[in-house]
Image: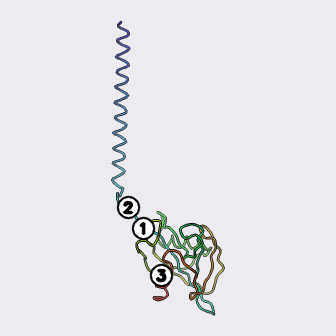
Amino acid sequence: MGHLEIVGYITAILIVVYIVWRNGDKERALAKEKEENLKFSYKYPRLAMTVDAIVIAEKESGPMILLIQRKFDPFRGFWALPGGFVGMEETLLQACSRELYEETGLLNIPLKQFFTFDAIGRDPRHRTVTTVFFGRVPSVTPVIGGDDATVAEWFPVGSLPDLAFDHGEIIRKFLKEK
């Protein structure tokens, strides 16, 4: 074996050693980055936060409540309170106002916090806690279903359709206390 062949083999070996060493550095750097990211991560399951709106309108025949018909599962086709998931960059009140507008077209309804419902199993998808807000309008106002609501409609408080989730319980508690 000649001198040039030996230099070629040594060069090839050095290149392989360098590549293995660099890959090890990359793996260590990725592991360190993952470790750094986990410092701010929580290894336990998290719950989902939602908001729901109870809007009451006065009518000569009695109070009316605003409901939406769900466009998607779970409970597709059932009636529900307008509401949905809270975004990461909004307060509960902002989320409730946004959801009310997206699903019914109602805007600038003064809302007050009513109660937080946290029963386990209240949403079949996952652990969900909802904070319910309420507002009153002087009369039945035109509404239109939007976003994930096929229809928005006013119902007499004493004659409600079958409701999704635990919304019947929520409405009963509200009527009893407010």
30 to 59, vertically: above or below: above
Query: Quarter-wise, where is residue 137 in the image?
Result: bottom right
- Residue 160 or 103: which is nearer the viewer? 160
Q: Which mark is residue 45?
A: 2
Q: Position of residue 164 (x, y in %)?
A: 53, 75
Q: Earlier in the sequence, mark 2 or mark 1?
A: 2
Amino acid at circle 3: Glu
For label 3, the residue is: 169
Q: Which quadrant of the rendered structure holds the N terminus?
A: top left
- Residue at 38 percent of width and 61 percent of height: 45
Label 1 CA crowd tier, 10 Å (few <14, some 14–19, many 20+): some
119 to 140, vertically: above or below: above
Amino acid at circle 2: Pro
For label 1, the residue is: 127
Q: Which mark is residue 140?
A: none
167 to 177, vertically: above or below: above
